[in-house]
Amino acid sequence: AQRCGADAVHPGYGFLSEIPEFAEAVAAAGLVWIGPNSTVLTRLGDKIQARRLAESVDVQPVPGISDPVRDRETIEEFIATYGFPIVTKKADGGGGRGITIIESAADLDLFFAAHGDDLGGYFVERFIQTARHIETQCARDSHGNFAIISTRDCSVQRRNQKLIEEAPAPELPGDSEETLVAWSRRLFDEVGYEGLGTCEFLVEPDGRVNFLE
């Protein structure tokens, strides 16, 4: 970028755009980084930190444990409160990676047989079986101006990978769309997000909204 006389760098889309160290390197080279800065990438790229951030600004995540799970007893206590099914997720997962749905004690046995005592980076959520996966496509500039470009329905999935995205998301129940907009803005404002980004939610049939990432 320096050799060709560029003033700014846009990382494109995908994994390179989510690496805080790359954003830092671009800024350290005296170039303008087009997108959220490295601190924001760190805070939002980790799903546990994103849950904690959401809770701090009164954005309700899917009911779960906002700390890395260390032992089976913690998961069993959660199940005693919320029942089966639950879902375990890796804090640094993405693209459908690191997600396991647990529907019974036998499934829990298999999970621990596979992972043993090395549970670093996993957290637990209630598995919401009937909900739409709704995303907000957001933009915020360095002056704090915020806009929702569109909502999109990404509910048609296979192996946690989206197959069809419909925008704008049709016929959202109740006042859920207003909640999606308000919560997305709170999240972007709290971290001083600059650039384009997506907030993901589960919207239940009765209009209840649950933040995902």
Image (cartoon, rainbow, N blue to C red):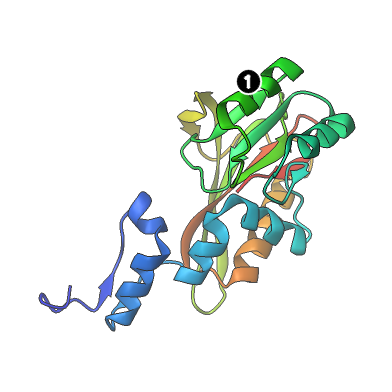
Residue 106: x and y in percent read 71, 15
- 58 lies above or below 152: below
Coordinates of residue 19 in the picture (x, y in percent)? 39, 60
Q: Position of residue 202 (x, y in %)?
A: 67, 38
**Residue 186 can be seen in this image:** yes
Q: Which residue is mark 1?
A: 110
Residue 201 vs 112, above or below: the answer is below
Q: Is residue 100 left or right of residue 77?
A: left
Label 1 Cα neighbours within 10 Å, binned few <14 / some 14-19 / many ≥20: few
Is residue 104 in view from this perspective? Answer: no
Q: Nearer the viewer, residue 11 or 91?
A: 91
Q: Quadrant of the N terminus?
A: bottom left
Among the 4 quarters of the image, the one containing residue 27: bottom left
- Across and down, in percent, residue 167 comes to 51, 39
- 196 left or right of 180? left
Vertical position of residue 56 compared to residue 60: above or below: below
Residue found 37% across the figure and 69% down from its top: 23
Taking the spot 53% from the left edge, 79% from the top edge, the residue there is 143
Residue shown at 73% from the left, 47% from the top: 61
Q: Secondary structure at mark 1?
A: helix
**Number of marks:** 1
Frontmost residue, 179 versus 54:
54
Q: Quadrant of residue 37?
A: bottom left
Q: Amino acid at mark 1?
A: Leu
Q: Which residue of the protein is positioned furthest toward the right in this rendering?
A: 81
